[in-house]
Image (spheres, coloured by chain):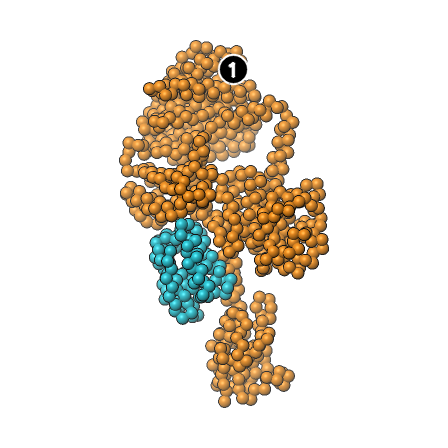
Chain colours: A orange, B cyan
Amino acid sequence: MNSVDGISTGEGSMRPSSRFAESLLSKISSSVLPFAERFGFALSWTSPGSKLWLARHQACTCDEEVATPTAVSRLEVRHDGKVIGELMLCPGRLAPDMLESLLAVSEMSIRQTQLEFEEEALLSELAESWESLDTLFEITSDLKFLLRPGEILERIISRAVAGIPASRAVLWIETGGRLEPATSYNWSEARARDATSGLVGRALASSETVALSEERRIREIPDLEPELRSASRVAVAPITTRNRLVGALQVWDESLEGKLDSHRVRLIEALALQAATVVESERSYRTSLEVERMRNDVETGARIQKLLLSARPPVARPGLDIAVLSVPSRLIDGDFYDFIEFPDGTIDLFVGDVMGKGVPAALVGAAAKGHLLRTIAVRTGAQKIASPAEIVTRAHRKMSRSLIELESFVSLMYCRIDPKLRSLTFVDCGHTNSLHFSRDSGALSVLKGENLPLGILEDEMYGECELSCQSGDTVIVYSDGVTEARNAEGEFFGEERLGELVRQHSSLQAEALLERLRDSIVSFCGSSSFRDDLTCVVIKFGDAGPGVLSRQTSTEFVSNLQQLAPMRAWLRGFVSQSGMQIDDQVFRLELAATEVMSNIIRHAYAGRAGHPISAFASIENTSLTLVFSHWGQGRRPDRAELPELNGDRTGGFGNYIISSIVDDVTFSEDADGRCHVKLVKQLNR
Amino acid sequence: MPISVERSGDVAIALVIGEYLDAGNAREFRQEIASVLKDSSKVILDLSQLQFVDSSGLGAILSCLRHLTTTGGELRLCGMTKPVRALFELVRMHRVFEIFNSREEALASFSR
């Protein structure tokens, strides 16, 4: 008589020591055990410290392992590179061919279980890799936004600590054979030290990342750094650029356990690479600054003044899209421009160009801008804002004598835009021709005035012209740096090429059109630095103006995460009232909007409750624009989260989601520090 | 953010009660689900009531998966509505989780 013992009531009543064993034995019991009763053989599972009988027969003597060793078949079972146990089959009265079959079936069960666990491990690694990718995506987005190097290094180190995970870290920079701490996390004893000793020295010498997760092995390192003496895990990645050692990224913890597997190592190596980029560019920046300082002081002063020559364009508003491209030349130049937004919604803009180059031209430019702004300020506040012609004439009166004495003159294009009427009133003073592209007729026309540049005739009276535009029209005001950009053969970029480009890309948003223009000029010239300043302003007129009902709305929210759901309801309401279907694309918009507002609350306002967030939505034809405005920290990318060791992190998923869903995201800050996040999405009806 | 839990054998079926899981209630969700994850190693998250999930909600669900995987447990998701499914596909998480249409199918997958 045989007795078949199931897994859970096996003799010795020891349960299988691991999940793997459990899974394997479950398969064995359904595939092999049913035969045990019929054929009379014994099957047991031996693992360190226990033996479990799955099936036995009376004649079985294999308890005494020595007794009939040759009769027993043993199958070693490996998992995770170790032998975790042995299946023993004592054949009893089994015929040889039956024995073969049962052994084959057992081996298959073992193999199947191994495959299942491999798959599980891979999926788990995939999920964890997501976290690493997530981290890397965040960092890549960071660098785009030109944080100060010190801030980027701090963020790198925070991510290293979150990603490993660990509780302390330090980023070393090599200087003259020693390591100086550039930034540290949760460790205040960082001091300059020798670069050749200890664990860090070892990593640097071998140019390879060292990752240890056993206290014993860490303590074995000769000259171990004092702070690592009680470490339970440590990872050190050398930071190198162009095969030159630049520093090291050291991350450690005193209580966390667990192997640091290959993707953790890859993560820290990737972070070290990012740090290398930052350090390298910081070094070159510092070097070039030093070289600069050795040059003419006046030129340096003029560079600062140059910043006063440029300005930020006004932000999104219904019916008007304005963007500016401003590329300073290698040497100082005299281009200047500015925007003035009046309370009634009109916008003045002027673009000017001083004859000549160098510091004198820049100073004249700054002075001219100053005179214009002062004149506008004085003339505003009366019952009516002065006309463009009056402003230019009065400003010129103040400057003309000085300009003549300096033998300098200034070309100027002064425009006043009325978004409601879609009109442009301009005073062109010898400036490069502006262009007007009409969407309806496809015609490209030139805007040209009759005035002389400033500084030619002392008492000149300036006259204005008016242009009426339609929705979809584009106006471009630019300086001669654009059309006079030269290629290697000495050919000019020219008005025609510019016009063609505008015609070709007339449906693009202003910012996008400028990007194309910049790319086009760079590729035409074969270089991204120019002899003259490039200044170009694109003005696009759109549909929705305040006179048009129903297609725009705005509302106020407060910086509280509970407001996310009401915001979504507001957005849904607006979209449905505009006649669009509520469907997948609305959900995606809600998602993008949620991520944006969530970022503003958690990061721009750093979680502080009760601060205002304005939301504006407009639909123009099939294009939806959403603008969230706030007074918080401007678009610096999210401050690195404090790593919480329970794995509670939110990450770059949000940014990825936003950029995948909408067609365009822009971040801007106006002169008063009010920040705007603008999302644009083409909808399908 | 209440979660109602039913048991079927050794499987815990947690129904998330609410229309959305976003940055506003993701923390609450994590706290509520923690006890379920502690008690059971086989968990089904029934998401049929959710019409909206954002990246914070996704992160919270991901942390359930991580917790269970580390402790040798298993997680299944069921009842995803279209918008939620769209999010998972957007970030390609639909391959990382075991997703089923119904509770029954999710349950059946455990007794493989």
Report which residue position mark 1 lands on: A408
Q: Where is residue A46 in the image (x, y as percent from the top left)?
A: 57, 77
**Residue A79 in the figure: left or right of residue A570:** right
Q: Which of A628 and A549 is in front in this view?
A: A628
* Displayed quadrant of residue B11: bottom left
Task: Name above or below for residue A493 compared with residue A641.
Answer: above
Residue drawn at point x = 34 percent, y = 54 percent = B19
Disc 1 marks which amino acid? Ser
Q: Which of A497 and A150 is in front in this view?
A: A150
Q: Position of residue A135 (x, y in %)?
A: 52, 49
Q: Mark 1 lies on which chain?
A: A
Residue drawn at point x = 56 percent, y = 23 percent = A302
Q: How crowded is mark 1: few (under 14 residues within 10 Å), some or many (20 or more)?
A: some
Residue drawn at point x = 38 percent, y = 60 percent = B3
**Residue A18 in the figure: left or right of residue A194:** left
Please identify the quadrant where the C terminus of chain A is shown: top left
